[in-house]
Image (spheres, helix red, strand yellow):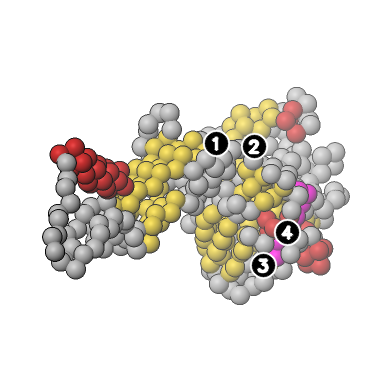
Amino acid sequence: MNLEQPVTTPDIAARRVLGACAALMVGTLTLTACGGSANATDDKGGKDSPKTSTAKITISAKDGSTSASINATGVKVSDGKLTDVKMTVSGSGQTVAGAISADGSTWKPKEQLDRGTKYQIAATAKDANGLTAAANSIFTTVTSANSFIGTYTPDDGSTVGVGMPVSFTFDKAITDRKAVQSHITVNSSSGQQVVGHWFGNQRLDFRPQDYWKAGSKVTMKIDLDGVQGANGVYGVQKKTVSFTVGRSQVSTVDANTQTMTVVRDGRTIKSVPISAGSAEHTTYNGQMVISEKFVQTRMNGSTVGFGGEYDIPDVPHAMRLTSSGTFIHGNYWYNKGNPPFGRSGTSHGCVGLADVQGAQGDTQAKWFFDNTLVGDVVIVKNSPDTTVSPDNGLNGWNMSWSAWTAGSAV
């Protein structure tokens, strides 16, 4: 039997070769386009397998977002380590300083970001096999119009008197007071219960039932970042603030006797003659907290409703008691036609102490100024005036505990 081999013409053979080459070229182009790498296989066969990094980068501010946090924006990676993160202000190219953590898992800006600013982040990381992953995001932080900030007192690290409340003043009206108050906690090492009270929609104060215990440490945690305080308005603050309560000092001004008795840690240390308000311009009664101190300051009657009755450019040793303009301060002009201090009240509602012009010399006012902390209490009694309003200055102590707690939103 004859077995004949199939006949292949030159043209058919050429087409088969070209077809095989074309298939090979298509495979090569596919590998190149995918960015994979080919690995040799054994004689049992196999195919090329592109490798992808297992590192997963997450940028907290999503690409295209318009209300990113100014505090919490950062970069994280899982199954790998960050190798480079660059953050810039879009448009200007200004670099935002930041640092990768020691274990390479996170990156954070060194400073709080600006509100209403467009930023760009480009991050790279490598997995355990050295394969690289990359991520990018362009975003805008929350604007001033869509965020709120609380200005607070006292400052971090300060030492204050026993009457000093924690007081927030917000730059926007807060309609969800419960949400905002529940994200601010105030605790004392003394174990005293601390409760917040709202004065309207923009002020929130915290205090215990009685004055702070001397020597205690108070810690305030502000966790308002992203908290909605009103429709479309979010908080941007996240920090912890601590202050120390100093010795206890409470001074009592008696408008009848025109004297002030200074009691420190339960012991009377000085009795000082004063001049309280006149019969026409009486001094408030009540517990008042010193909120500011000035070695010298200008006092102009026109700013507090007294027209041009006085304008003194250099009032010495001035300590604020109310936001409406009541001070306890040095008085160097008193002796011009007035009896000695301690005889009668002649002021426009302030409490005056003997002093000299220029805030120099060994005077009663200088002694009291030097021995006073912001947060010390001055109590005025026996004045024909009314009791100071609790929200006129830092004077919530003039409210009963039941009324104070009733003003809490939580």
Q: Residue furthest front?
A: 1
User: Residue at position x 60%, y 38% from top?
Assistant: 144
Query: Residue 145's mark?
Result: 2
List x then y, in percent, for residue 142: 57, 41
Mark 1 neighbour class, 10 Å CA radius: few under 14, some 14 to 19, many 20 or more: some
Sequence-wise first label, 2 or 1 = 1
**Amino acid type at mark 4:** Lys
Highlighted magenta segment, given as a residue range = 194-202
Q: Quadrant of residue 92?
A: top left
Quickly name the residue at label 1. Answer: 116
Q: Which residue is mark 3?
A: 194
Q: Nearer the viewer, residue 330 or 6?
A: 6
For marks 3 and 2, give the CA distance: 32 Å
Label 2, residues with CA under 10 Å away: few <14, some 14-19, many ≥20: few
Q: CA distance from mark 3 to mark 1?
A: 35 Å
Kindly identify the amino acid type of the residue bearing the numbered disc 2: Ala
Q: Which residue is painted at 67% across and 62% down in the image?
A: 182
Instruction: Tell whether label 1 touches label 2 (CB within 8 Å).
Output: yes
Choose mark 1 or mark 4, whichever is in front.
1
Residue 215 in percent (x, y) is at 53, 69
Q: CA distance from mark 2 to mark 1?
A: 9 Å
Where's residue 107, x and y in %?
A: 37, 53
Marks 4/3: CA–CA distance: 16 Å
Residue occupied by mark 4:
178
Q: Earlier in the sequence, mark 3 or mark 2?
A: 2
Circle 2: element type: loop
